[in-house]
Amino acid sequence: MKKILIIIIVLFSLVSCDKTKEVATEKIVKPVPKKVDFGFVYADFNVVHDTIKKGDTFGNIIENQNIGDRRVYDIIAAIKDTLNVQSIRFNKPYTLLRSKNKKHNLQVFIYQPDALTYYVIDFRDTAVVAYKKIKPVTIKRRTIGGVLKESLSETLGNAKIEGALAGKIAKIYAYSIDFMKLKKGDRFAITFTERFINDTIYDGVEEMEASFFEYRGKIIYAFPFAQNPNSDKIDYYDEQGKTLKNFFLKSPIKFSRISSRFSSNRFHPVQHTWKAHKGTDYAAPRGTPITTTAAGVVEQSGFTAGNGNFVKVKHNGTYSTQYLHMSKILVKRGQRVSQGQVIGLVGSTGLATGPHVCYRFWKNGVQVDALRLKLPTGEPMTGNNKARFLEKIKPLKFELDSIANL
């Protein structure tokens, strides 16, 4: 009987021990991350974000906060070596960090004149402390490529790339590609760098490292290179070291469209008669800048009933160009102009049905079709520079070709 009782006690003890070995599942609570900006933990403050409105001054902004018995005049005098409060501009953001108690005493004022810079006015000590900070910038590299499904601007926009890159590319290729003639299905690839503030906030394109575009069935590369290593002067060259910079730009207007071509017999939309059209019409919104396609001297600048406001530029003893129907002329006769300089704005003056510029081209005193003319190009690099250039672009070209499957 004793043995049976002992066995029962032992079994009961074992069952009890087993119950204590059950692993309790512990609920893990992850701490909520505290937002930190400008070096301050927002959870420690009552935070107010706002922008400078018309009529706002630093003085009336802080006067509307609880700053105790401090005088605005004394605060402005104390911080003048760091921040001139007269430089505070309309529509710029600022942040107020206030105490979390019921009084909401102003403790820190932060002003941001641009995406990178901010000023801190700290009221927490007896003496007001002011300092300027620059946010860290990270440069990230990216290569995109493939087939154009829409315009270059739309393609870059869909890839979440700053629109300024399209303008930069258009400028680089201004001598070799008319971007109005790029077609859906043309291949392209671009390697570029972008700026990020605090490693996360996108701040635009830094520079273009390499690119190519398919244009009229030909692949045209662009690689930046300084022939003089001790100079900051950068020019762009193709994969053979030939400069992309020609004597003439392809078009007097960026990102426009050709509305009428050079023709020996065209029906004039205003005069309603068939006659020669010795120019190329580029349609664009009124006020669009018109640039001279090559350097030269303004030979004529004025108005006629047919041409409207126009400018004619003499480039050398062989070539001249003319720009018609301007809404406004921005140069004078006898003035020297550089390639790409804005000489007027698109309009519809003279015999014109809508805003456009009629671009006319003379070679040896005869009007010719600028789109069909083989224009002079720059000289390619030679010698040691070419060898150095070809070695530099090898990995860049491979990267472009790989992403576009050339």
Image (spheres, rainbow, N blue to C red):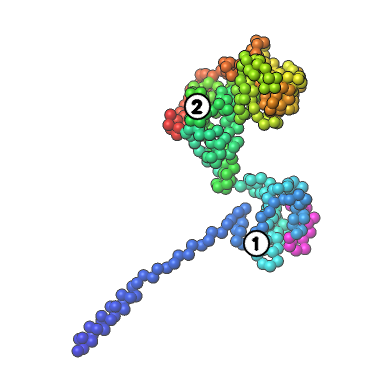
Quadrant the N terminus occupies: bottom left
Q: Which mark is residue 214?
A: 2
Residue in the image at 69% along x and 51% along y: 51
Q: Which element type, helix, strand or loop, lies under badge 1?
A: strand
Total number of numbered discs in the rendering: 2
* Residue 310 seen in this snapshot: no
Of 66 and 374, nearer the camera is 374
Q: Residues within 10 Å of mark 2 (few under 14, many from 20)?
A: some
Residue in the image at 62% along x and 29% along y: 256
Which picture quadrant has residue 65?
Answer: bottom right
Q: Which mark is residue 46?
A: 1
Residue in the image at 67% along x and 61% along y: 98
On screen, 363 above or below 95?
A: above
Magenta segment range?
A: 65-80
Residue in the image at 54% along x and 24% along y: 237
Label 2 – label 1 distance at C-alpha: 56 Å
Percent of width and height locating residue 290? 68, 26
- Residue 282 among magenta residues: no
